[in-house]
Image (cartoon, rainbow, N blue to C red):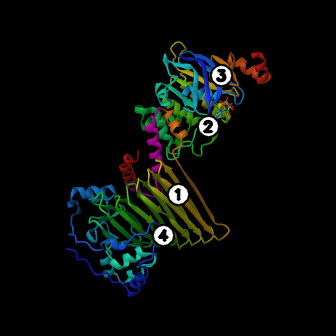
Amino acid sequence: MHQMREIKSSRTYRDSAKEASDKPAAFGEDIDLSSYASSAEEKHYQDDPSELPDTTKEKMLEVGVTLDEPDQRSGTFIQEDNTPIHCSVRQEGIEVMAVSEALEKYDWLSDYWWRAIAVDTDKYTASVEMNQNNGYFIRTLPGYKTTYPVQACLYLATAQLSQNVHNIIIAEEGSELHLITGCTSSSEENAGLHLGVSEFYIKRGAKVTFTMIHNWNPGINVRPRTATIVEENGLFLNNYVLMKPVRSLQMNPVARCVGENAVVRYNSTLVATPGSSMDVGSQTILDARGAKTEIITRAITTGGDIISRGYIEGNAPDVKGHLECRGLILQEGGMVHAIPELKGNLAGIDLSHEAAVGKIAEEEVEYLMARGLTQNEATATIIRGFLKVDVEGLPPMLNAEIERAVQASEKDIM
Amino acid sequence: MLEIKGLTVEVEDTEILHGIDMTINPGETHILFGPNGGGKTTLLMAIMGFPRYKITGGSIFFRGNDITRLPLDERARMGIGMAFQRPPAVRGVKTRDMVAAGLKERASEEKVRHLAEKADLADFLDREINYGFSGGEIKRSEMMQLLAQNPRLTLLDEPESGVDLTNIALIGNLINELLHKNCPIRTRKCMGLIITHTGYILNYVNARSGYVMISGRIIGCGDPHEILATIKERGYAKCIKCAK
Ligand SMILES: Nc1ncnc2c1ncn2[C@@H]1O[C@H](COP(=O)(O)OP(=O)(O)OP(=O)(O)O)[C@@H](O)[C@H]1O
Ligand SMILES: [Mg+2]
């Protein structure tokens, strides 16, 4: 049996958090944190997660977390509400554990705690520090490469709960980690709040792909706070998929390239159904020579609102960045607002963006119809093409996982 | 057989075609000449059934059926296919998806690849359709899609414009295959209507007759080689005079 341990934390973080406890986020609707409970009943540890109820496993599978095929994953972490209920590793050179346990085990972990992102960024980071409902610690040791992805699931089961998790991911020099994080809720309607801080540290020559699939419900507010530091020749590939209803989602993850030739790529696929409100950005700060980034967002509204931000800042010679946002309006009443921003202060940097928002072009539908497809088939083909994520550098298995999540939601859109 | 009678077509409330008559018998290929803006593309789009090209008078019969009011996709499924002058790029839709769409239930990876090789587009299958394609690549890709579709009536809008000399021969071969030109005329069923300015395609494809279309009217009809020679020698101005 696995005991929940006390997370040690210096007083200064607590103090800063307290001071920021009312600080609204830069973007997005302000949420009244006092209307949520921050503690929930402890859950039982599961040695064999395949014994979880079928309904739970199905929910998890929809977000890429598979519990019936353990040989398809090199590690698994599951947290239900505030309790880590399962943790296992199947490959040498990989560590997967509750962050509370990692803090006990490694004194040095405090060096990474709130280093990529400031604790007083806003009331949500502050809430995570003050409530500390655990989270995961995942680390690949120098030179080790995961063959299969490591999966983590953050599962919200109790109504009106606020989940406050703090995750730390470290890819040591020359290592390779494919992480898939699925976040979902047990109920189709219970209100809830998900606050997740994730700090990624990608050391020299390491490669991390992070695929996050969300599946909430119309009553849940979501405020992830992700920050990444990428060292020399490191690669960070971030994929995000949210195609199911949510009350509101606001996030604006930032990756900082601190080492030469570091590469960061963001791919986001967003579908806003009626009543969903999303404010999603991706930011890359290119602080070292030769660093590169690409930010691609595909946003579809079937009646909800999407603000799609992108920000690239070039502060070093020979950096390159490209931002692309494509928005598709399938139903009147929905909105897509693309806000691409570029900032450079040196000659010889290369930053660009393109954005397009509109409905499906009739001309394209007709082109496919002229090949014999019906109007519905033609429209579906174009939407499917729009959503197709063939992320460069992502293992085929994870591309397939994203494809599966996309396909599962397609019927709701069309 | 394709039989067009007294066809008038409007685009955005302006009548562009003013009473077109045309008959294409099974196995025949006809050529459409005419100056820019004369209405050639409009005629093909109206035969194909694009909603923007509104048929306000006359009729189109295809293989004995009145298709004047049929929607675009039904006409495609009945066996009408078109190679576009300027097809749109469709982001996210791969070239292979378009070929497979044309093949329908006959689609297989092997067939798709075979057609791509024929059109010298094997490396294009995973590219988004028409996105960043050169002028000549677009033409070959249109031919490849039509070969997949295998239509009974093939409408080709300037299949050779912008195509280099070696590729014209390739395009010519693809057209002959599409129109089943190796089949004797008596048993051949495929029909073609081809728009050309240069007439280069006549060096590769046999055609029964040619039309000259000016300002939305067909003002002359005859042997396509003779028409081409006349246009080359005297230009369209003379044709207009002849017609009057
Ligand atoms: N969507 C449209 N809106 C307004 N006018 C149109 C539209 N489409 C075509 N036209 C007009 O109809 C006329 C015939 O055009 P069409 O494209 O059929 O000519 P064409 O004979 O194919 O010419 P080209 O040799 O240049 O391809 C032109 O004057 C054109 O401007
Ligand atoms: Mg034309």
Which of the four quarters of the rendered structure image does ligand 2 lie in? Answer: top right
Give yes or no for contact between labels 4 and 1 (Cβ–Cβ under 8 Å). no
Gap in angstroms between the C-alphas marked 2 and 1: 30 Å
Q: Which residues are magenta?
A: A372-398
Q: Chain of mark 1?
A: A
Q: Chain of mark 2?
A: B
Gap in angstroms between the C-alphas marked 4 and 3: 69 Å
Give yes or no for contact between labels 2 and 4 (Cβ–Cβ under 8 Å). no
Gap in angstroms between the C-alphas marked 1 and 3: 45 Å
Residue A230 location, x and y as percent? 49, 71
Q: Are marks 4 and 3 on the same chain?
A: no
Give yes or no for contact between labels 2 and 3 (Cβ–Cβ under 8 Å). no
Q: In the image shown, does A30 or B219 lie closer to the viewer?
A: A30
Q: Is residue A376 left or right of residue B29?
A: left
Mark yes or no: residue A209 visible: no
Residue A150 location, x and y as percent? 34, 64
Disc 2 Cβ-to-ligand 2 distance below 8 Å: no
Say which of marks 4 and 1 sits in front.
1
Q: Is residue A38 above or below residue B222?
A: below
Q: Are marks 2 and 4 on the same chain?
A: no
**In terms of secondary structure, where does tag 3 sit?**
strand
Q: Which residue is mark 3?
A: B18
Q: Which residue is mark 2?
A: B86
The three-letter amino acid code for the residue at tag 2 is Arg
